[in-house]
Image (spheres, rainbow, N blue to C red):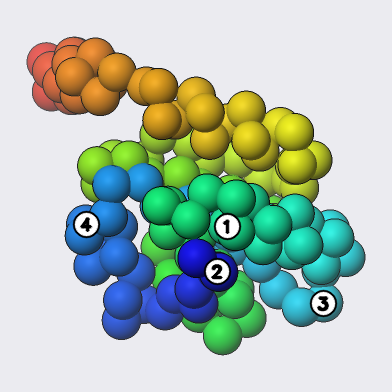
Amino acid sequence: MATTNLTAADFEKTIADNDIVLVDFWADWCGPCVGFAPVYEAASEKHADLVFGKVDTEAERELASAARIMSIPTLMIFREGILVFAQPGALPASALDELIGAVRAADMDEIRAEIAEQEKAESSS
């Protein structure tokens, strides 16, 4: 599967309807974004069972703002609707592959339990 352009209209539905979604926030004037694009595209071909979305931060300013994008490129990865990774900066292909493997292997019950603990701690303080 190739990359998919995501907009404010389909972003949340894409996250909700798919197990693992990677999202690259980028702009065409950004040198590192342009450099990361072929790495991201190649990963989308290699991992065809995952959704690889791209958000053009110039065209989707409100979406980028809602996602608190401060620097591009920024890669976010959602699994089962939960944000499990967010980091600015372009990654080399090997690091992206390792990251995808780690997300696939993540224990989502453990992650949900950690989130519940954090929410409990925040609500009691």
Left or right, residue 87 beside residue 60: right
Q: Mark 1 points at which residue?
A: 44
Cα separation between marks 2 and 1 = 6 Å
Do labels 2 and 4 touch, CB within 8 Å?
Answer: no
Q: Which mark is residue 5?
A: none
Q: Which of marks 2 and 1 is nearer the N terminus?
A: 2
Cα separation between marks 2 and 3 = 19 Å
Do labels 2 and 3 touch, CB within 8 Å?
Answer: no
Q: Name the residue under label 4.
A: 16
Cα separation between marks 3 and 4 = 30 Å
Q: In this view, does 8 lie above or below 101?
A: below
Q: Mark 2 points at which residue?
A: 3
Of the residues shown, which amino acid type is indicated by label 3? Trp
Q: How crowded is mark 1: few (under 14 residues within 10 Å), some or many (20 or more)?
A: many
Q: Residue at x 50, y 24 (%)?
A: 102
Q: Earlier in the sequence, mark 3 or mark 1?
A: 3
Q: Is residue 24 visible?
A: yes
Q: How crowded is mark 4: few (under 14 residues within 10 Å), some or many (20 or more)?
A: some
Do labels 2 and 1 touch, CB within 8 Å?
Answer: yes
Q: Where is residue 16 in the image (x, y as percent from the top left)?
A: 21, 57
Q: Mark 3 points at which residue?
A: 29
Cα separation between marks 2 and 4 = 17 Å
